[in-house]
Image (cartoon, grey):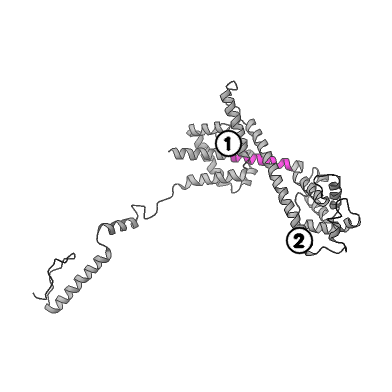
Amino acid sequence: MLGSQALETAIGLALLLCVLSSLASAIVEGLARILRKRARDLEETIGQMLSGSTTFDKDAKDALERFKNTTVYQSATIASSRGRRLFRTHAGPAYLSAKSFANAIDEFTDKASAAPAKGLNAQMAILKPDRQGLSVEKKAAIENWYDETMSRLSGAYKRWATGALFAVGLGLAVGGNVSIFHLAQILWQQPSVRQAALDAAEQAAAKSTSPDDLIDQSVKAVEDVAGIGIPVGWQSGTDWSSPAWATAHVAGWLATALLVMLGTPFWFDALSRLVSLRTTGAKPPSATQDSAAATSVQASAGASGAPAAAIASAVATALQAVAEHRDRHGTAPPAPALDAGPSAAPDDGSD
């Protein structure tokens, strides 16, 4: 009973954290699009790569402007601006493949060798001193250089997104009065709320096949969570005059924000595993461990009585003796005892 109660409480907590993290992820993603976070990071990084600058200074900006004039980058900009109505003039690609970057460098070095920007002489102009196309080896080196730089840029974006998730998660926790400690207490003590959360979690796990499904329906999911009776929101009473209550709730908000930082994929996977663990039940015992299984019955019979091979051998010996006696005397002898031991008198062949 205690194990089932703990598992159901964990499922309820995972459900709420999955909903909060999906909503926070949607907000962070929308914020990144409004701020053009990926596109700006890509542009600044390319400018620093081409100029050799450690910051996005004037040389980096000059190199970026020259790079933007390549047909490869312009084509990527046109494709990324499709379907945008707002900020279309400032649109730029959020991603650029290593192959496209190398092709743009091939075009870029033609102009850089003629009128190179500061910081480009040592890196760009010497790539094509004869103004011929870049060789496969040089393009491969440029692609590796770009991939390594973008890998570090991806790590930096993940760190930014993690910090943004904490800030948004803390805002949701405070705005919705979502204290993970108070929620765990309610789910543990109130079976009706725990059962409602359990039913909602099973439905969510059955209908959603990926975290994206929860992100797309994040607002509806929050409404569903509030509707099943999970204690979120400011409708419940507060007691800010009590230091213990205030400390517990502030700590609960911080803990909620920290758990939201783990992200929607983590909580979606945790919710699916917990629901699966509850619905599948305990693992059945093997045949050798199940006393009602035929394997166990056969093993018990073999241990308590004579082995099957010994019994078959005794029966065959008795039948052979009967057949030999009938051939000699025409009558069958008395049935011999199957368990006759060494003390039994030997048959001398007489009547």
Q: What residue is rendered at 56% in x and 43% in y? A: 204
Question: Which residue is at the front of the view, 346 or 31?
Answer: 346
Query: Judging from the image, what secondary structure is the residue with disc 2 in?
Result: helix
Q: Label 1, secondary structure: give it.
A: helix
Left or right placement of residue 36 versus residue 274 in this view: right
The disc, 2 or 1, on the residue closer to the chain's N-terminal end is: 2
- Residue farthest to the right? 115
Q: Nearer the viewer, residue 77 or 196?
A: 77
| Residue 97 in view here | no
Q: Which residue is mark 2?
A: 140
Q: Work out whether 162 lies above or below 325.
A: above
Q: Position of residue 72 (x, y in %)?
A: 82, 56
Q: Quadrant of residue 225?
A: top right
Furthest residue in direction left, as rendered: 351
**Quarter placement of the C terminus:** bottom left
The amino acid type, in three-letter code, at marker 1 is: Val
In the rendering, at what x and y percent does residue 138 appear? 79, 61
Q: Residues within 10 Å of mark 2 (few under 14, many from 20)?
A: some
**Predominant secondary structure, magenta span:** helix
Magenta segment boundaries in residue numbering: 17-32
Q: Mark 1 = which residue? A: 225
